[in-house]
């Protein structure tokens, strides 16, 4: 691994330490059906989203509810000292991507065949705390480079 890719990998690894997420892969539901439920809970508070998912009749609701509970558990492991009641958790981002597609044949009249596509999806759910102060490491790095540039030009 080169130096550049190693540094980028380290930055990605550090960035993930501040994210609280859960992933669901190869869920055997079509992405369209899952996106309908995901659009309902996007940006909502965690407690309200759990209530919506519990009472929603959609096929993907139980799976998304379990995924949200997993993301909450991940948040709790990274924040052992704080209580979940004191934090203001919300669903920051939820992404539904299409997964693998199983292709099957369905017999049709007159010796023909129709293709059936059994779709699946991948879901990534990211939660965040509204009370948590944002980390401004990037702005400090940018300011440092500007100061170095101004010193070089004055000399």
Image (spheres, grey):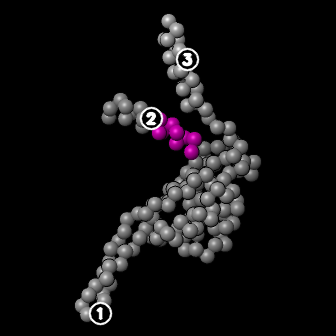
Q: For the residue labelled by badge 2, is the local secondary structure a helix, a strand or a loop?
A: helix
Residue 52 at what x, y percent from top left?
A: 67, 67
What residue is disc 3 on?
147
Q: Quadrant of residue 101?
A: bottom left
State the predominant SS element of the stretch in magenta.
helix
The verdict on residue 129 being magenta is no
Disc 1 from disc 3: Cα separation? 76 Å
Q: Is residue 32 above or below residue 18?
A: below
Q: Is residue 72 above or below residue 79?
A: below
The verdict on residue 15 being magenta is yes
Residues 96 and 2: in front is 96
What residue is disc 1 on?
109
Residue drawn at x 54%, y 40% as measured from the top left: 17
The magenta-colored residue range is 10-19
Quadrant of image for the N terminus: top left
The residue at the far left in this view is 111
What residue is disc 2 on?
10
Disc 1 from disc 2: Cα separation? 58 Å
Q: Of label 1 and label 3, which has the lower sequence position?
A: 1
CB within 8 Å, label 1 to label 2? no
């Amino acid at each position: 691994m080169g130096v550049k890719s190693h540094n980028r990998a380290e930055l990605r690894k550090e960035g993930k330490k501040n994210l609280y997420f859960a992933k669901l892969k190869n869920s055997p539901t079509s992405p369209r059906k899952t996106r309908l439920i995901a659009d309902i809970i996007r940006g909502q508070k965690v407690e309200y989203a759990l209530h919506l998912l519990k009472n929603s009749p959609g096929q993907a609701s139980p799976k998304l509810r379990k995924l949200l509970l997993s993301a909450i558990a991940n948040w709790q492991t990274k924040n052992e000292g704080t209580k979940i009641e004191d934090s203001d958790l919300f669903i920051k981002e939820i992404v539904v991507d299409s997964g693998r597609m199983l292709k099957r044949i369905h017999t049709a009249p007159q010796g023909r065949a129709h293709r059936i596509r059994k779709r699946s999806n991948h879901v990534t759910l990211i939660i965040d705390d509204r009370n948590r102060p944002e980390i401004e490491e990037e702005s400090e790095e940018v300011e440092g480079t500007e100061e170095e540039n101004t010193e070089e030009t004055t000399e």
